[in-house]
Image (spheres, rainbow, N blue to C red):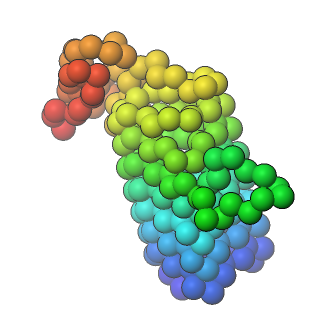
Amino acid sequence: MDYQVHPSAIVDDGAKIGAGSRVWHFVHVCGGARVGKNVSMGQNVFIGNKVTIGDNCKVQNNVSVYDNVHLEEGVFCGPSMVFTNVYNPRSLIERKDEYRDTLVKKGATLGANCTIVCGVTIGAYSFVGAGAVVNKDVPDYALVVGVPGKQIGWMSQFGEQLDLPVTGDGETRCQHTGAIYRLTNGLLEKVTA
């Protein structure tokens, strides 16, 4: 075994966990889960059967990654944030055949206590603020806060807010890395390294 598992954790037979990953106190990884390299799963994390987690993700304490949630490389899940997989749950009605896929793209940050309603895509390098409730797709690099989640700005790959309007056109430079970002017709792209 080329990853670390705390004695209190449960890793079911069949689970695939990449080299260098760390499974901390009271974690449960189900047998169908696919977890990449160098992933940190904090205390009291649950990873479902139909879940994929890319390399270098951080899943902080008290996060449940339910079936049909897929995290690409480098996603940060803040403490106690929430994923769902059924849009209209009822205890008395089984809806396992109605799970909706949720995709969190490369480098995205999901702040502490935010909620991601199933069936959405969270864009690459986007940033969902603490406590936000996201019920629609989030563009790449977007900064989303509030209930319901609303885009209020743009973030760099470095994780700093960019000086750009939410809509329209513009160009700016990341103060930390010098990378240039261009906003065209409401879509942001990084144009230099």
Q: Is residue 149 above or below residue 65?
A: above
104 or 98: nearer the viewer: 98
Which quadrant of the structure image shows residue 40?
bottom right
Q: Residue at x 57, y 77 (%)?
A: 32
Counting from the top left corner in percent of width and height, residue 99 is at 59, 58
188 horizontally vs 191: left or right = right
Front in this rendered view, residue 167 or 131: 167
Residue at image point 46% right, 18% down: 152
- State the residue lying farthest toward the right: 92
Quadrant containing the C terminus is: top left
Residue at image location 66% in from the left, 78% down from the top = 11
In the rendered view, tell whether residue 83 sits above or below residue 109.
Answer: below
Quarter of the figure that contains the N terminus:
bottom right
Work out whether residue 86 can be spotted. Answer: yes
At horizontal 50% and vertical 69% (from top left) the residue drawn is 35
The part of the image, by quadrant, that contains residue 146 is: top right
Taking 4 as reference, is 2 left or right?
left
Q: Position of residue 117 (x, y in %)?
A: 60, 42
Give the residue at the far left of this rendering. 192
Q: Is 189 or 58 nearer to us in this picture?
A: 189
| Left or right position of 48 against 162 | right
How many marks on residues?
0
Q: Is residue 73 above or below residue 169?
A: below
x and y percent of residue 147 in the render?
Answer: 64, 24
Judged from this view, the residue extending furthest toward the front is 93
Residue 163 appears in the figure: no
